[in-house]
Image (tube, helix red, strand yellow):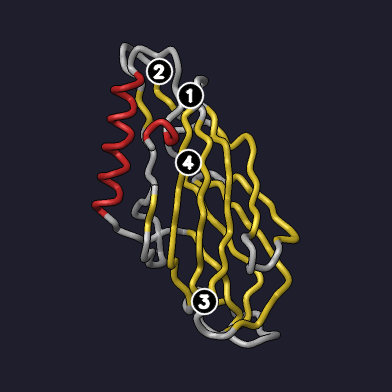
Amino acid sequence: MLEELIILKGRKNRLKLAIVLVFLISIQLAALSLMTNNTIAKLAQPGNDDLTTNGYYYSHWNQTINVGMDGSLLVVEEMTFHLDAGSYGFAFRDLKWRSFHDVVSWSVVSEPGTPSVNYYKMEKEAEAINFYWEWSRETVLSDTEYTFILTYNVSSAMDLRGNRDRVYWNVIGGEFEVAIHDIDT
């Protein structure tokens, strides 16, 4: 599994880097502050423009990280939203600028049984990169689940200075605003 998570070839310190990355991920999972600026938006009543973010939680979160030879990271986040009854039509994920240069590519897709994404955009702000996506608004019954897969590639995420290669990445950090019930990395 570690080989799936980290792909580094020809580096003297790849075992040390793998151990550090696994250690950092396990620290994040142990801390489980479980709150982010990642949300799915719900209209309180159809036709009402007042948005609320209550009425859902993450029933499952799976994140896979592949480290490239150039210091880039390919991150795949599978997010399953457990929804209360209501009308839903968009979601977003805010990624704080930390230990990487830029997001060079990204995509978001829906899993079977989840409405198809029909519009998406990314905005870069001073403190975060905002991923936003929409689908045709649907009114759902309680206990409905939607799963989306967000994939993005960040450049220059590895610190290659000195005799050590380092990657610092918060899989689950203190910025989450909504509970996550099941986490895999």
The reply, left or right, for residue 136 in relation to residue 18 is right
Q: Say few, some or many: other residues with alpha carbon within 10 Å of mark 3 (under 14 / 14 to 19 / 20 or more).
A: many
Nearer-the-camera pick, 75 or 173: 75
**Would you name the residue on which mark 4 appears?**
97
Distance from Cα at disc 2 to Cα at disc 3: 42 Å
Q: Earlier in the sequence, mark 4 or mark 3?
A: 3
Q: Earlier in the sequence, mark 1 or mark 2?
A: 1
Q: Is residue 147 above or below residue 100?
A: below
Q: Residue at x 59, y 64 (%)?
A: 91
Where is residue 181? Give x, y as percent: 36, 66
The residue at the point 38 percent across, 30 percent down is 167
Q: Which mark is residue 160?
A: 2
Q: Is residue 100 left or right of residue 106?
A: left
Q: Identify residue for label 3.
A: 83
Q: Earlier in the sequence, mark 2 or mark 3?
A: 3
Q: For mark 4, does the 10 Å Cα neighbourhood hold few (<14), some (14 to 19), or many (20 or more) residues?
A: some
Residue 94, horizontal then vertical, whole percent: 52, 53
Residue depicted at x 46% and y 43%: 64
Q: CA distance from mark 1 to mark 2?
A: 8 Å
Is label 4 or label 3 in front? 3
